[in-house]
Amino acid sequence: MRPLKAYINLSALTFNLQLVKKIAKNSKVMAVLKANAYGHGLEESVKAIKSADGIAILTIDEAIKIRKAGFENTILLLEGLFAGEDIYEAEKLNLNLVLHNDLQIEYLEQVTLKTPINVHLKINTGMNRLGFPPDQVDYLIENLNANPNVSGITLMTHFATADEKEGIEKQLNCFNQVTNNYNLSSSVANSAALCKFPEARLDWVRPGIMLYGASPFEDISAKKLDVKPVMSLVSKIIAIQDIKKGQSVGYGDNFIAKEDMRIGIVACGYGDGYPRHAKTGTPIFVHQKITTTIGRVSMDMLYVDLSRNTEAKIGSKVEMWGNHISVDEVAKNSGTVGYELLCNISASTRVPLEYIDG
């Protein structure tokens, strides 16, 4: 069996949820488990965060799995319904629905439900992705209050720059201006906002990336946020080569040795979700020591520098990211973000997930 595996520490996931509750102690927590729980496995992740007040996902199919896993609290469809006929399944599963376009409003007007549904009205405060313009909010709330298929309304938005210097002030001011006249539940804070901006910790917070032990910020590490890594991507060395000064390594002669070197070949590549664009010098943990990658990442393999790790051998354990190497460090060296790397594991069918507790 190929040695590559992703270990998922469910205790760390539970710990991170409890940390969110401590930070946003006056808010309900809507744990975001979309994209197969950011690559960590949906059903197993549900078991670790059952104390969350709600779970946010994208599809009806995900909601069915979450209910089957025993979760009885709120489930929110973050993009609402994609087809009108799905409203009956949403009713059956007792789902909350985001409303962000006119067609979704029509879905609610064209049916008669036995059980009314809670909706989350999304307001476009400046990200310009999903949501209604602020000047339509009064009309929409009046419309929804008059709809017998609606049992309750939560007002929500999403911040574009909560993790950057611009912050949230402009968008939050816009949100408050159009919602302050209503005594309705509100939800605005993602991971970055709930960590950095107490004023965004309203009735609900929506943590995503921080639940999985990664940071939403470029300049604040996961360690500084006190979150624990949930996924450890682990493999082994499958070959060792001794190369001379001036020899190249890998496709495209991308790396030329400046001195005689000992290198290891690891069973993990971009076909498994490791970033192809990880540059030479990306940190990696080999046989209890931090070293670096060299050369271009292949589909099934990558190269590591063993020149100062003489004890490493074929079969030695390698951690691409996890407890010793932050996924954010790998992402930074690859021109991407930790979100993408974690989700890439879910997209790959070649990396088995093994769940551990502690």
Image (cartoon, helix red, strand yellow):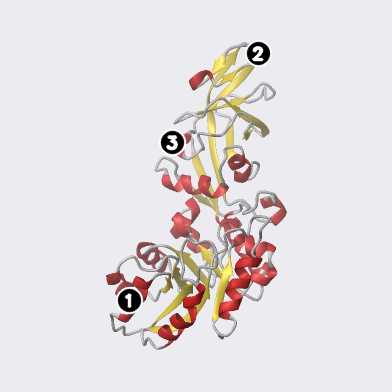
Asked which secondary structure carries label 2, the reply is: loop
Badge 3 crowding class, 10 Å Cα cut-off, few under 14, some 14 to 19, many 20 or more, is many
User: Badge 1 is on which residue?
Assistant: 106
Query: Considering only order in the chain, which callout, 3 or 2, is on the residue closer to the N terminus?
Result: 2
Instruction: Identify the residue shown where x is 36% and y is 87%.
Output: 148
The front one of 4 and 17 is 17
Q: Residue furthest front?
A: 135
Disc ID at residue 260: 2
Q: Earlier in the sequence, mark 2 or mark 1?
A: 1
Q: Identify the residue under disc 3.
A: 271
Q: Nearer the viewer, residue 166 or 60?
A: 166
Say whether residue 95 is left or right of residue 200. Answer: left
Give the quadrant of residue 91. bottom left
> In the image, what residue occupies the spot 59% across and 13% down?
243
In the rendered view, tell whether residue 306 sits above or below residue 38.
above
Look at label 1 and name its amino acid: Glu
Residue 79 x/y as whole percent? 42, 65
The first of marks 1 and 3 along the sequence is 1
Q: Amino acid at mark 2?
A: Asp
Mark 1 residue element: helix
